[in-house]
Amino acid sequence: MEAGLTLNSSKRCVVKICKGSSTGKWKKITDNVLIKAEANGTLASYYRDHKDEYICIGCYNAIVVNAASSFKEHALNWDNGLKRRRNSFSISESILLLTNFIFKREVLDGEPPVFSFSQLRSIAINKNNDLSFFFDQIEDIACLGKKTEAEKRELERSLAYQCYLMCWNQSRVIPLWNLHESEMGGDYFSWVDGVNVLSKFLYDREKVEQKPAIYSFKQLHKEMVAKDIRLSSFFNSIYNATLLDKKSDNYSTNDVK
């Protein structure tokens, strides 16, 4: 039998792009195998972590004997990805970046929310390429690469919502839309809409009707929402942003009728 060759159908090849071997023949990853793979340009760095484990004869031939182009590409992509992962932001840092992006886009600029994960990814990365690894991780966790096109479409809204939820947990001022409702489209009531509507109500109240100013947030909330129910989400976002529930028990939006 060839040196280093074993027969065992229970083994599992450590090569991530292995397509399986029907022969049941295996080769141990030795120093010599690693040296030849490096010389061939087919050495993916994780092979070193599996020294003394086994690869199937098909992968062995592709890596050591034939220097197959697909395995050269795999080695290059793996090492490039490793470098990118090392240089990327942590999950918490990425969520903070995304939170700041959504805050500026939707709270300050009044843009509508994004209900599609792929669209959110595209828009966010276009603004800050440092977010690419974060979105890659979300895709990996969701196993998008193994999903059918129909399954991917079903996940689009859910994954986008999860991104918003992580940002909302970072800052409660981030608008958190309802996962189970249909897209709001043109009926979406933005932060800017809220400011404009409230400004008009206050102008009419104090300048036209000559009523005194309101100095209570609770009273202002109650009176303005009675005029336009859409202002409820506007006031709630202000309340959540200030985290009043951690500062005082004297006010709760649940008390507002």
Image: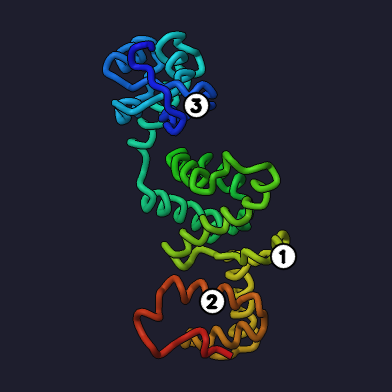
The residue shown at (64%, 46%) is: 152
For the residue pair 77 and 59, the one nearer the viewer reads as 59
In-image side of 24 versus 120 (left or right) = left
Residue at the disc numbered 1: 187
Looking at the image, residue 131 lies above or below residue 238: above
For the residue pair 1 and 110, the one nearer the viewer reads as 1
Q: Position of residue 219 (x, y in %)?
A: 52, 89
At label 1, counting other C-alpha atoms closer than 10 Å, the crowd grade (few under 14, some 14-19, many 20 or more) is few
Foreground disc of the pair 1, 3: 3
Residue 235 numbered tag: 2
> In the rendered view of the protein, which quadrant contains the C terminus?
bottom right
Residue 18 numbered tag: 3
Indicate which disc, 3 or 2, sits on the residue closer to the N terminus.
Answer: 3
Q: Position of residue 84 (x, y in %)?
A: 38, 33
The residue shown at (50%, 55%) is: 104
Q: CA distance from mark 3 to mark 2?
A: 56 Å
Residue 144 numbered tag: none
Indicate which disc, 1 or 3, sits on the residue closer to the N terminus.
Answer: 3
Q: CA distance from mark 1 to mark 2?
A: 18 Å
In-image side of 220 versus 248 (left or right) = right
Q: Amino acid at mark 3?
A: Cys
